[in-house]
Image (cartoon, rainbow, N blue to C red):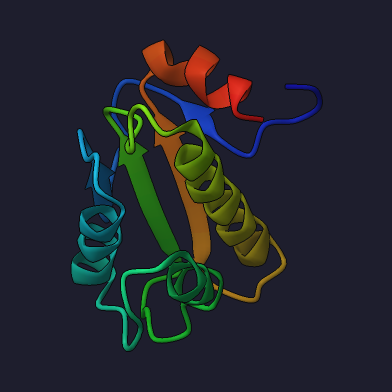
Amino acid sequence: MTGHSPFKFSELAEMSSVIVGEIDDKEKLIELYSDALAFPYGSPNWDSFADCMTDLEWVTTSEIRVHHTHLPLAGDRSQQKIYLDILKDAVKAGEEHKSPVVNVSFVPTLQRDVESLG
């Protein structure tokens, strides 16, 4: 991966709204976020997840932290790439003040896997 990474690598995020562990099912992954962030609408698909994550206007805090202890959707690199692309868009939306700031972190052992999905 070239350039500046939108992700952080640390042992534990100081204050997480969402902690992502071993989840191999897309619907369960989206449900985790929906429950943690109280998504106001949507169904467990990537389009709805992307819409919610890039427009978090109902969230009352100025920052959302997402920490990964595992890279979800193991064994399905195409789904992992979609997931990471949505998180990148969420980070960008927060930086552009379209949404609360979204900080995404991973344990350091995941850095190679995350960056290989570029």
Say whether residue 10 is left or right of residue 101: left
Check the picture and name the quadrant holding the C terminus.
top right
Q: Quadrant of residue 31?
A: bottom left
Instruction: Looking at the picture, tell me which residue is in the foreground, 34 or 73.
Output: 73
- Residue drawn at x 53%, y 52% as measured from the top left: 87
Q: Position of residue 63 (x, y in %)?
A: 44, 61
Q: Quadrant of residue 93?
A: bottom right
39 in relation to 72, above or below = below
Q: Position of residue 41 (x, y in %)?
A: 33, 88
Q: Position of residue 66 (x, y in %)?
A: 36, 47
- Residue drawn at x 55%, y 56% as measured from the top left: 86
Check the picture and name the quadrant holding the N terminus.
top right
Say whether residue 38 is left or right of residue 75: left
Q: Position of residue 77 (x, y in %)?
A: 49, 32
- Residue drawn at x 61%, y 20% as measured from the top left: 116
38 in relation to 90, above or below = below
94 in relation to 3, above or below = below
Q: Quadrant of residue 52?
A: bottom left
